[in-house]
Image (cartoon, rainbow, N blue to C red):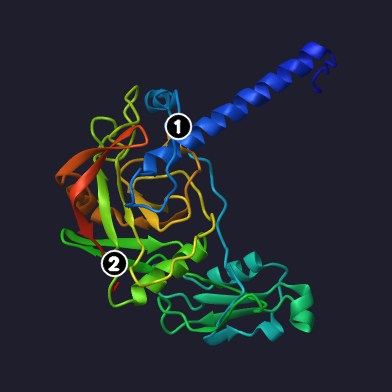
Amino acid sequence: MGRRQNDSGFGKFTLLSLFLMGAISCLAVYLFLTVVFSPNNTTASLSSMEHVDGVDDLLNHEEEGGEEEEERPCCDGVEHLELWGDAVKWGSDFRVNSSKECCMACKRMCRGDGGACLCNSWVFCGDRDACGPRFGECWLKRQKDALNPERRDLGDKVMWTSGLVFDKGEGIVGLETDYGILRIKLFPDCAPQSTSYILELLALPHCIGCQIYRSESRGSFWDSEGNHIKKASFGPPFALIQGTFESIGSTFKDIPKEYCPTIRRGSVAWVGSGPEFFISLANHNEWKNAYTVFGSILSEDMEILEKIAQLPTKSDVWNGINVAVLENPVSLRFRRITT
């Protein structure tokens, strides 16, 4: 049944008021999330912001997050990149309409039992003008080393889009700390550019400058499984570990926004466009879909993060928000993991 229309001036004014109220609410949440992760010193490259009046009220917001919406399967790649490798399906004989279809064709060659995928990389030509007669070609390939994929060409003039596909037991890298190795399952199909950067760090002999500098426990606000306790505050503490993946001597380029699901316990996500990152110790439904998630810590390794969350800290104030900064930052080193 259609809604009865009301063309009166009062009706128009009401709609305008509701729109403005919604816009102000969204802006307040955005400013709060930025402030929560932004120090007012030089330990991070994020821009500092002034404290926003009323933002503290968001900390005591009582609305519980609802059921997580069913998310569409990701199948994205990196534009202007051509990956090499042995072809398991020739693009000259296999054409599709989009890069997503090409990616899905590669995914279908994974058994889903944790074993190696027959196809672990794909290359698609989707620029009609640049590709010419090769438009729509989808090359399904097998990398000898998926954590160090063979690149043939990269740059604005490259007409190809490429991506990686990892099965359940693949695409896991180690983040070594003095308290144990955190295993991260990467999401190359959802956050391909983020994954490419992490694989670049993996190829370095050292990640000088990579460290964890902020550590906040779950407090009494989230249970051991990361679920928020009803009517409890949302922090501080904010149940997270924060650090940087910027390696001294390497050039970092801002990473565009990619896959932004609800933050879950174990999620590894960028603060803004990186290289600052955080790992969540809890389910943060209240943060909505604000951060690019490019990986997840294996559940067996969460106890290592819980140890780090209990290390000695000192109080600091970042733009009006109380945070806990580690007295001694934890150095990080990327390592290959044999599965």
Three-letter code, disc 2? Gly
In this rendering, would 327 be left or right of 70? left
Place of residue 28 in the rendered image (x, y in percent of width and height, measured from the top left) = 51, 30
Q: Viewer-nearest of labels 2 and 1?
A: 2
| Distance Cα–Cα, label 2 vs label 1 | 31 Å
Q: Badge 2: few (under 14), some or many (20 or more) residues near its Cα, within 10 Å?
A: many
Can residue 166 be seen here? The reply is no
Q: What's the residue at 42%, 44% (across, down)?
A: 263
Q: Which residue is mark 1?
A: 65
How many numbered dots are placed on residues in this image? 2
**Disc 2, SS:** strand
Q: Secondary structure at mark 1?
A: loop
Query: What is the three-letter code of the residue carrying label 1?
Result: Gly
Q: Residue at x 45, y 24 (%)?
A: 53
Comparing 295 with 166, the one in front is 295
Q: Position of residue 200 (x, y in %)?
A: 40, 73
Q: Is residue 18 visible?
A: yes
The image's mark for residue 312 is none
**Classed neighbour count for the residue bearing mark 1: other residues with Cα under 10 Å, few (<14), some (14–19), many (≥20):** some
Residue corresponding to mark 2: 174
* Vertical side of 251 occupied by 303: above or below: above
Query: In x, y percent, where is residue 166?
Result: 45, 69
Q: Residue furthest right?
A: 7
Q: Is residue 226 above or below residue 245?
A: above
